Image (tube, grey):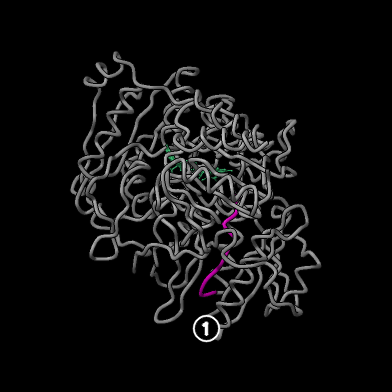
């Protein structure tokens, strides 16, 4: 079985989120970059399936120079090779543009399964894996929280629905799966894995290699701003002791739960 | 603007988010001198006929009676091509997540997802949240477009009532490939914990750091005679069982007090707890979205507050 995992590099949850002067982008300063959370679960699921049924796991990202790191991290965890798509022309793509490029790069690889996280932590469009399925003509399933291999041409996946409901769905290969968090317990890279990573191949792909030009976005940001609060929040401040005294008082006398 | 509102039917019942979205569609129609057409796959529930819309477009094919993405995509793709709406709006349900992105690719239309509102003042824009709800983005695009609205973006009880004629369109979908075969839906066996009736919930998020710290919040919950709840990552990591998860893929709760500790307040968490009478949030990040819905906010390190709070409450009892 041949699998591809799409991985995106995103700012980690503690990074500052500051609007740039142009009001349509975010400042890059002080950001710690990391692998998108659900992409990590997607990689683990691909590795588990490979360990059980054989095959190859390829990781692929589109990003700036720094994004090479997410490919390396995935290789250190056990992926076999990487594809790093990078070009200034690809810096401002939306989901549609990214999927178009992934389709161009991946179409001749004939993957049985394409994994991605169900959405990114920063832009949260939750679309790339599905648009790619359309471009490559594969089957698809979103919010996958379990997989069960059937044979060389089919897989069963458990899809999460709202409020504790689920639905198993059978898919023909090739299939594009978007993975929900909690499907597995992602591994850490071992020291051995990190050593092995250094010998694994990473192919770098640019716009020229693909004979592709900038792909106009179907939508663009007109203005970014900090949300206006809709609720009057009473903030309690002071030393921990003062906070605890005030809060206890409110719990007792206002909210009346003591 | 010629607006189509896709109405999701779950087991014969109109999805609540679809009703909210219909409210949004009516408001958009009012702002643009436009019209709203409700689009329904399969049987039309009677209550849908009590809402104010220009007409109900009832798309009929045997394959549409139960959800299956490739049939849904093909059906709506043909409807959009033949009827030429300016925009089609959806509720941002898990089902919509599963098929509308692919529909947008087929038709090469922009799909603006999980929007919290729209503006028509100079150009038509929609507002999305990015960076985990910390930033709003007004998005510009060309119609025709596809737009999904977040739970709570509009109110179901503000939907205008009226009458509507049903126009049926029968489609032949026999050529759609059967490469995706959904099985039966099932519900996870209910655990022993029922948070929906809890009076007080102490809820813990990723900010708790590690499993070894869970007893800290457990003690606070015990002192308050409260149930322990949590956000999704706490369940994903195996620190607490799924039956304690609050949110769109967990439980919906409405306690007298919801005390959120180290929870950022993502929309998927909020939909499960915003009905609480009083929300108290402790978070070290003053920009955490939880403070947008909290009644009482404390910007602090939870480890400095929680043990002392437990002691202080015990002393009162
Ligand atoms: C389809 C879908 C369904 C989902 N369903 C659910 C669901 O049902 N329930 C749910 O909860 N989520 C759900 N999620 C996930 C959701 O989007 C968020 O990722 C999740 O709620 C974040 O959990 P959190 O707030 O605990 O973690 P984070 O977002 O990582 O927030 C941790 C917070 O802790 C604070 N913090 C850290 N250390 C401290 C400290 N020492 N003291 C005080 N504060 C501290 C940080 O400032 C931060 O705000 C779903 C997501 C998707 C896409």
Boundaries of the magenta span: B85-94
Q: On screen, B106 above or below A190?
A: below
Secondary element under disc 1, as helix, strand or loop, is: helix
Q: Is residue A120 visible?
A: no
Where in the figure is residue A33, as x and y percent of width and height?
A: 29, 40
Figure label count:
1
Residue most extreme to the bottom? B33
Question: Residue, x 59% and y 34% (percent of image)?
Answer: B220
State left or right for residue A234 relative to residue B8: left
State left or right for residue A105 relative to residue A51: left
Q: Is residue A56 magenta?
A: no
User: Foreground residue, B209 or B221?
Assistant: B221
Question: Residue, x 38% and y 55% (percent of image)?
Answer: A96
Where in the figure is residue A8, as x and y percent of width and height?
A: 35, 41
- Location of the C terminus of chain A (image quadrant): top right
Where in the figure is residue A78, as x and y percent of width and height?
A: 36, 21
Q: Residues within 10 Å of mark 1 (few under 14, many from 20)?
A: some
Where in the figure is residue A136, as x and y percent of width and height?
A: 43, 45
Q: Is residue B223 visible?
A: yes
User: Foreground residue, A213 or B95?
Assistant: B95
Q: Which residue is mark 1?
A: B32
Residue most extreme to the front? B315
Q: On screen, A204 above or below A98?
A: above
């Amino acid at each position: 079985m041949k699998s591809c995992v799409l991985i995106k590099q995103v700012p980690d949850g503690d990074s500052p989120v500051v609007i740039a002067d142009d009001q349509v982008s975010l400042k890059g300063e002080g950001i710690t970059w990391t692998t998108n959370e659900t992409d990590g679960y997607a990689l683990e699921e691909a590795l588990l399936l490979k360990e059980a049924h054989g095959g190859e796991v390829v990781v692929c990202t589109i990003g700036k120079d720094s994004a090479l790191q997410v490919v390396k991290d995935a290789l250190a965890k056990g992926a076999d090779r990487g594809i790093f798509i990078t070009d200034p022309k690809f810096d401002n793509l939306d989901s549609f543009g990214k999927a178009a490029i992934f389709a161009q790069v991946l179409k001749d690889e004939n993957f049985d399964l394409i994994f991605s996280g169900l959405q990114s932590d920063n832009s949260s469009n939750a679309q790339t894996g599905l648009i790619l399925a359309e471009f490559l003509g594969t089957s698809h399933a979103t919010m996958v929280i379990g997989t069960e291999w059937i044979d060389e041409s089919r897989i069963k996946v458990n899809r999460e629905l709202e409020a504790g409901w689920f639905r198993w769905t059978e898919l023909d290969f090739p299939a594009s799966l978007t993975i929900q968090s909690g499907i597995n317990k992602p591994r850490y890279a071992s020291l051995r894995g990190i050593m092995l990573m250094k010998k694994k191949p990473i192919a770098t792909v640019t716009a020229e290699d693909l004979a592709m030009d900038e792909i106009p976005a179907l939508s663009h940001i007109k203005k970014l701003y900090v949300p206006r609060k809709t609720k009057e929040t009473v903030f309690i401040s002071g030393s921990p002791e003062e906070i605890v005294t005030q809060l206890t008082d409110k719990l007792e006398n206002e909210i009346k739960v003591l | 603007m010629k607006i189509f509102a896709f109405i999701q039917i779950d087991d014969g019942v109109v999805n609540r988010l679809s009703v909210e979205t219909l409210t949004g569609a009516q408001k958009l129609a009012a702002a643009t001198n436009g019209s709203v057409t409700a689009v329904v796959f399969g049987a039309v529930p009677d209550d849908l006929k009590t809402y104010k819309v220009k007409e109900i477009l009832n798309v009929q094919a045997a394959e549409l009676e139960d959800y299956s993405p490739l049939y849904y995509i093909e059906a709506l793709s043909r409807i959009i091509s033949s009827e030429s709406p300016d925009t089609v709006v959806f509720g941002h349900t898990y089902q919509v997540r599963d098929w509308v992105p692919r529909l947008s690719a087929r038709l090469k239309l922009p799909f603006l997802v999980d929007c919290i509102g729209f503006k028509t003042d100079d150009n038509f824009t929609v507002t999305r949240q990015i960076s985990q709800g910390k930033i709003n983005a007004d998005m510009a695009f060309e119609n025709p477009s596809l737009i999904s609205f977040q739970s709570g973006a509009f109110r179901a009880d503000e939907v205008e009532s009226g009458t509507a004629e049903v126009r049926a369109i029968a489609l032949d979908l026999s050529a759609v490939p059967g490469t995706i075969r959904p099985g039966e839906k099932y519900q996870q066996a209910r655990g022993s914990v029922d948070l929906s009736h809890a009076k007080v919930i102490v809820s813990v998020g990723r900010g708790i750091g590690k499993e070894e710290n869970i007893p800290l919040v457990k003690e606070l919950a015990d002192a308050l005679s409260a149930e322990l709840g949590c956000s999704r990552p706490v369940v994903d990591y195996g620190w607490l069982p799924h039956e304690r998860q609050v949110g769109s893929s967990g439980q919906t709760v409405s306690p007298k007090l919801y005390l959120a500790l180290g929870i950022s307040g993502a929309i998927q968490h909020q939909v499960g707890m915003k009905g609480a009478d009083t929300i108290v949030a402790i978070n070290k990040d003053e920009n955490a979205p939880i403070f947008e819905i909290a009644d009482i906010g404390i910007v602090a390190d939870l480890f400095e507050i929680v043990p002392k709070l437990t002691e202080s409450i015990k002393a009162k009892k």
